[in-house]
Image (cartoon, rainbow, N blue to C red):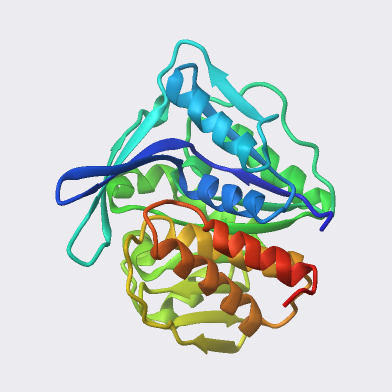
Amino acid sequence: MSKRVIGIGETVLDILFKNDQPQKAVPGGSTYNSIVSLGRAGVPCAMVTDVGGDHIGDMICRFMQENGVSTAYVCRHANEKSHITLAFLDENNDAQYIFYKDHRAVSLEGPMPEFTKDDVVLFGSFFSINPAIRSVVSRLLHEAKNAGAWLYYDINFRKSHIADLPEVMSNIEENMRLADIVRGSIEDFVNLYGLNDGKAIYERVRPFCRTLILTDGSKEIRIFNADEIETFEVKTIETISTVGAGDNFNAGYIYALLQGVKDQKSRVKMAQRWSQDVCQQIGNNISDELVRNLALERNGSV
């Protein structure tokens, strides 16, 4: 598995609560969760991000290194504090978030990756459209595209940023134009365009990117590609936490791609496998058991 995955996204410390009591504190962030799970599965990975020069920043970087993710492109701010997110699990174990971060204070300085045609680039969330760092992120995405890398854009646009839409919509659409695949939820497109109909959503996305993965929580997954729509059922499982579910769907899909899986059904099956694994634990990344099973499968032992 020689291909490298480079993530471009934010990092935070996630503190997870159940019944208003803290259950676990783990390094997180949408793209970060995906990249760490891929690193755990043995995929060469690196992360373009920024962290504070504090103890939380140390935790975030150490967790990356422990899981096989390069910190070569992590920008450390000696006099800044790292970001924190509180995730409150409700009776259905879905998370409601409170974010403690200053998007205006984000900056990316220092070494940046040189992309090749064998690279996969995963990016998304507000980090990828943040006006404070947009010039750097846009340059990186264009360099990756020009080098022939494969780009996966997870929109992940939250309701709390709707007021920012006039300023960032052009960034979102540029991201879609550069991507080989766009992944978004119904909620994303309600926030962006006020649309919840799959076909209408695809008509808005199609001028920018021909392939859209549309998710809707526990409902079916749809993949739109030109005039074709493929639909995949979502297996009902008992969840402990949905934190990181979408992030690990992305990671599982990319893992299948790197394994040479050609058909969408098998890619989505792997993506769901990773997502469901994370939902059955308190944490943001795939379990040790899944890591072991993936290794056995790669070695032909099962």
Q: Position of residue 129 (x, y in %)?
A: 50, 43
Q: Relative to residue 236, is residue 32 drawn left or right?
A: right
Q: Relative to residue 29, is residue 90 drawn left or right?
A: left
Q: For the point 41% across and 51% down, which residue is it? A: 283
As drawn, 33 above or below 260: above
Q: Nearer the viewer, residue 70 or 66?
A: 66
The total number of labels drawn is 0
Q: Position of residue 55 (x, y in %)?
A: 44, 20
Q: For the point 34% across and 65% down, which residue is it? A: 187
Q: For the point 54% across and 42% down, which residue is it? A: 9
Q: Relative to residue 27, is residue 223 drawn left or right?
A: right
Q: Position of residue 236 (x, y in %)?
A: 37, 82
As drawn, 286 above or below 102: below
Q: Relative to residue 215, is residue 208 drawn left or right?
A: right
As drawn, 101 above or below 121: above
**Quarter holding the C terminus?**
bottom right
Q: Nearer the viewer, residue 196 or 235?
A: 235
Q: Position of residue 4 (x, y in %)?
A: 76, 50
Q: For the point 60% across and 33% down, which residue is it? A: 135
Residue 208 visible within the image: no
Quarter holding residue 68: top right
Quarter holding residue 229: bottom right
As drawn, 254 above or below 83: below
